[in-house]
Image (tube, rainbow, N blue to C red):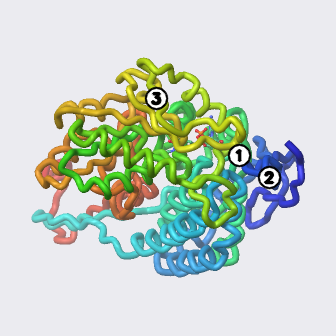
Amino acid sequence: MTNESTEFYGHLIDGKETEAQDGRRFPSVDPWRRTAWAEAAEGGREDADRAVAAARQAFDTGEWPRMGHTARGRILHRLADLVERNAGELAAADSRDMGRPVAQARAKDVPRAAANFRFFADHARLTAAEQLPADNGTHVYTRYEPAGVVAAIAPWNLPLMLESWKVAPALAHGNTVVLKPAEQSPASATVLARLALEAGVPPGVFNVLHGHGPAAAGEFLVSHPGVDRITFTGESATGRAIARAAADHLTPLSLELGGKAANLVFADCDLDRAVSWSVAAAYTNAGQVCLAGSRIYVERAVYDAFLERFTAAADALRFGDPAEAGTDIGPLASAEHHAKVRGFLDRLDGGPQGRLLTGGLDPRDPRVVRPAVVVDAAAEAAVLQQEIFGPVAVVTPFDTEQQAVAQANATPYGLNAMVFTEDLRRAHRTAAALRGGTVWVNCYFVRDLRAPFGGVGASGIGREGGVHSREFFTEPKAVVMDIAGTLGPEATGAAR
Ligand code: NAD
């Protein structure tokens, strides 16, 4: 690897972009060119302390939590405008950091980031709070008060999109934030924080702390007593470590973790549509999506037809330089991640671990994995049980709906599932029976930001989105007033 880095992305603390306290930096490697294209500040304990102190001060004494939803919303809409205006820089930052095709980052991730800020700004302002009917002369209502300092820890796979999904609701509800982006993808977070300042977000309200996870910036942040909420997206194993750290201070946390989504294709589906959605579900972002439909169960009557079309569509995907407009699939995000995905392909044995039908490693190019289709894997095979997080889809036939649902539910994960069927009753039945936080019927990754988003089992704890984000990023407070003036102490504690 050569080092040609030119860009520097500092921490952004209290409105100022800074080096680490001890001056350390780490490189961000462009996985296609295999060069360090940028450097970021390497956060240590002092940096985490500085970032939390800035967020604490802005929360305890600053205007942001007190200015009200309308004023905050105006600023967050300005930030959304700036995100759109700076789409090129933001998309290029993610693309260079982790290899996402820049055209996709620009067409999908940047607009979604802007939409996150707009949606949560409006949702926070417009959503009603409960007022409970009471016939005892009281007036009972709920106040959703900002929770405090939010630590947001993000992964590298869709950096800007996932970071804005946390930062937007946290800010909209009046919190202050310390965001720690993944060490593989530091750039867009600093750009976003610069834009937030330009939009009028006061210094100290949105801070960015760069650095690594264990025994580094990430761990120092989540174990900090000055943090009031932790929102984390990443691997299930990391989620467990963070939950242990959070336990010391009883810090409430939301965990969006790994997945191993099943995709059920019934013989009564619209096969062309099922194939094109299944290809998108398996291979978008080179399969580096928590929601990726990596286990495809196909009813036996259409198994051969599905496999033929799915394999042809997988082979037709163009992989290559993420900077080029026509690229469907870029490199895997890092050499380490490539090695992890390769480990799964190396284990394919033509027997119970499965057989590679097409795609896989490219002997001439160690950066990419071609869209891979695996068949004949036994239910306990690693490719069917563990999260690969790469462009590897395992296709398996089934005979009955019950069998399909049982296979789909047979992993520790429960993030999402897909169902392709034209039978209305079957659609509702399977949507109810599948274990997971989201079931997409005849589509994939179509998001409604009002809907709950999260996972069960090893896929996470809690839900975000709409009122669920409000619940997490605020302290709901019940206010009970005796407005009739008729209640006496004897009524206290009575069930109503
Ligand atoms: P990761 O868990 O390795 O890292 C995520 C973040 O956690 C990084 O910022 C990292 O520095 C930090 N971190 C690591 N150890 C830490 C510690 N001990 N304390 C505090 N922070 C720590 O995950 P990744 O490899 O960056 O991302 C891929 C994973 O994310 C996959 O498992 C994927 O399924 C999951 N993911 C889930 C969702 C979802 O919504 N459920 C969305 C995207 C990605």
| Residue that label 3 marks | 383
Number of marks drawn: 3
Query: How packed is label 1: few (under 14 Cα within 10 Å), some, or many (20 or more)?
Result: many
Which element is circle 3 on? helix
State which quadrant residue 326 falls in: bottom right
Q: Which quadrant contains ligand 1?
A: top right
What amino acid is found at the position of numbered circle 3 in the picture? Val
Q: Residue at x 44, y 54 (%)?
A: 280
| Residue that label 2 marks | 40
Which element is circle 1 on? loop
| Pick the front one: 230 or 327 | 327
What amino acid is found at the position of numbered circle 1 in the picture? Glu
16 left or right, relative to 213: right
State which quadrant residue 163 falls in: bottom right
Q: How far is the residue under mark 2 from the one under mark 1?
A: 9 Å
Q: How far is the residue under mark 3 from the one under mark 2?
A: 35 Å
- Foreground tag (3 vs 2): 3
- Foreground tag (3 vs 1): 3
Q: How far is the residue under mark 3 from the one under mark 1?
A: 27 Å
Q: Residue at x 44, y 58 (%)?
A: 474
Residue 106 in picture, x, y percent from top left: 59, 68
Query: How packed is label 2: few (under 14 Cα within 10 Å), some, or many (20 or more)?
Result: many
- Disc 1 under 8 Å from ligand 1? The reply is yes
| Pick the front one: 290 or 356 | 356
Quadrant containing the N terminus is: top right
**Callout 3 touching callout 2 (CB < 8 Å):** no
**Callout 2 touching callout 1 (CB < 8 Å):** yes
- Residue 60 seen in this snapshot: no
| Residue that label 1 marks | 183
Query: How packed is label 3: few (under 14 Cα within 10 Å), some, or many (20 or more)?
Result: many
State which quadrant residue 53 falls in: bottom right
